[in-house]
Image (cartoon, rainbow, N blue to C red):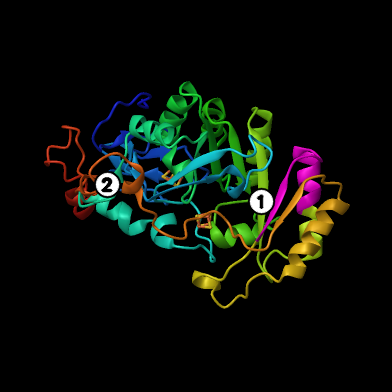
Amino acid sequence: MAQTTTDHDQYQLVETHLQTRNTNGTTQCDLCLWRCKLSHGQRGFCQAHVNRHGTLYNLSYGILSAIDIGPIEDKPVKHFRPGTQVMSVGSYGCNFRCGGCHNLEISWGVEALDDLAKGQSTAAYVSPERLVAAALRHGVDGIAFTYSEPAVWLEYVVDVAKLARKAGLYTVYVSNSFVTDEALEIVAKHVDVLCSDVKSLSDAFYKDICPVATVKEVLGSIAKAKQLGMHVEVRTNVIPGKNDSPEELANIAAWVRDSLGADSPWHITKFFPAYKLSDVPPTPTEILHTAADLGRKAGLQNVYLYDDKGCDCAETNMPVAAYLDDDPLAVHTIKKCAADCCEDEGILLKKYEQNP
Ligand code: SF4
Ligand code: SF4
């Protein structure tokens, strides 16, 4: 049922790659472990996938919230093509709701995704071909999917990754790893690098940001990505009072050693206050050093500490148009679905959401 190739010059809904029709009339999205079961007119937890008459579609295919160019080390990825430049892109939508998430307008993107659903969005639409062409024009070596959660943007990620590989570019997937095995198998075929969070080893921590997530599932996905042949690097954003006990940090390090290898990098980043955790102070430098010491003590050979860098969710809306070759005004025009199946002149969902 899934649409596997796209050649869309204009914005349109693209069928969700992994979906299953249930006998009770709902359709299940199998991209991430929420496995949302949706009826006509409903959207999944991430808000980026919608059921229309029994078929699920991705609303955010080709929709970019931000682009930036910088060293791959900034993702952070240190052991894959060091010294190269990567074009980072993000969309809208995430399957977690972290209390310390920065710039919810991008990472969760609820308003942006609402606008897409209503055919009122002016977010930039960039086809996979245009994105890869832009990357080549800017002379970068790879493309990274980051800022929002790429698991909920899989259709676009895969199409870009296929073209990127053909063009000699590598791809990087910066994720929270709350993903199904079947989605990961698709990603691993086309994407070179997984940079994943290991946020905590406590189920309570994960439950707080995603009621259906468990540590076992997240760690299992990361280990599986490595088994599937991806280059994997993990990072832990150390949050005071949440995941900074020496015992937990030592256990994370031991998991990296045992599951990914003693030479696998562990990136330790600083927490900066935001959203519901605005009253939590930035991570003290000495705690970051304690974490790094515990990592080395556990036998990890490549521990990296960042006293000035948080996690890679979006901080600002970066100027998408500046990286494209079009008239900047044309990039941000109203986006309505170009497919002719809606029978409502491209206004995607308004009537269905009012009368589900
Ligand atoms: S990607 Fe995850 S959160 Fe979004 S609709 Fe699919 S299962 Fe639900
Ligand atoms: S911090 Fe990352 S995983 Fe958590 S809600 Fe924000 S974008 Fe999603």
- Residue with the mark numbered 1: 235
Relative to 84, residue 290 above or below:
below
Mark 1: secondary structure: strand
Q: Is residue 272 visible?
A: yes
- Check disc 2: other Cα within 10 Å, few if <14, some if 14-19, many if 20+: some
Give the magenta part as a residue range. 252-269
Q: Answer left or right for 281 relative to 19.
A: right
Q: Look at label 2 and name its amino acid.
A: Gly
Measuring 65% from the left and 38% from the top, which residue is drawn there? 82
Q: Answer left or right for 30 relative to 344.
A: right
Viewer-side residue, 75 vs 246 = 75
Decide which of tag 2 and tag 1 comes sooner along the chain. Answer: 2
Q: Answer left or right for 197 relative to 59.
A: right
Relative to 116, residue 307 above or below:
below
Residue 267 in percent (x, y) is at 69, 51
Question: From the Cβ of disc 2, is ligand 1 less than 8 Å away?
Answer: no
- Which quadrant of the rendered structure holds the N terminus? top left
Measuring 25% from the left and 40% from the top, which residue is drawn there? 326
The label shown at residue 208 is none
Relative to 167, residue 54 above or below:
below
Q: Quadrant of residue 203?
A: bottom right
Residue 99 in percent (x, y) is at 53, 66
Measuring 58% from the left and 38% from the top, which residue is drawn there? 84
Q: Answer left or right for 256 relative to 207.
A: right
Q: How many marks?
A: 2
- Residue with the mark numbered 2: 41
The Cα–Cα distance between marks 2 and 1, rounded to whole angstroms, is: 37 Å
Q: Look at label 1 and name its amino acid.
A: Arg
